[in-house]
Image (cartoon, grey):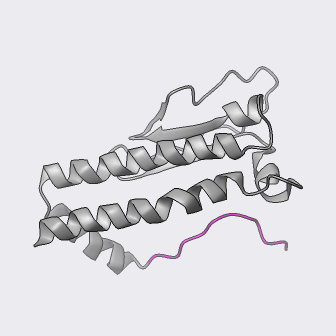
Amino acid sequence: MAKKPGIGVRVDANSVKRTQRAYDSFGEAVKKGVRNKITETGYLIRTDAQRGAPVLYGLLRSSIYIDNRGRMLADAAPSDPRGQFVVPFPRSLPNGSDVLVGSALRYANRMEHEHPTKSGFLQNAFDRHAPKALEEIEALLNREAK
């Protein structure tokens, strides 16, 4: 069986519970700061992915969406007259603790991994912005923990 391309993360359930308990101990202002940084980073990733997409105009570029707090934002779901989208769109958590950036086009995954000159447009955008966001969130949490 061929390995499917994509990003995978293995997480220990006990680690997640410990992290959630520690996060819950912070005040609402800190949690709001973290949620805002996650949302901001999602927009940055989406913008960079659109810039790096293998087309200047068209369905692939306009199909790159951001979903935050369980709802699609901006012009994330363009019309789909030819049935190009995979349904349903994935949904983020309603509490704002994550953000989804991607494309639900049937051929977007192939373009992400196999395009001859512009492959990795989503992954490159993620790699560019996620480390800085993690550093800023960590700094915010460390400041509050002191």
**Residue 72 drawn above or below residue 143:** above
Q: Nearer the viewer, residue 38 or 54?
A: 54
Instruction: Pick the residue in front: 63 or 135.
Output: 135
Asked whether, in this view, residue 132 is left or right of residue 138, the answer is right
x and y, in percent, of residue 33 in the image: 25, 50
Query: Can residue 93 be seen at all in this image of the molecule?
Result: no
Q: Position of residue 63 (x, y in %)?
A: 67, 34
Which quarter of the picture shows residue 123? bottom right
Q: Residue at x 54, y 48 (%)?
A: 45
Image position of 127 with respect to 73: above or below: below
The residue drawn where x is 14% and y is 61% is 26
Q: Residue at x 67, y 41 (%)?
A: 51
Magenta segment: does it hold 27?
no
The boundaries of the magenta stretch are 1-11
Provide residue 69's location: percent of width, then percent of height: 38, 41
Taken as a whole, is the magenta stretch helix, strand or loop?
loop
Q: Position of residue 94 (x, y in %)?
A: 36, 43
Residue at image coords 67%, 37%: 87
| Residue 60 position (above or below residue 98) | above
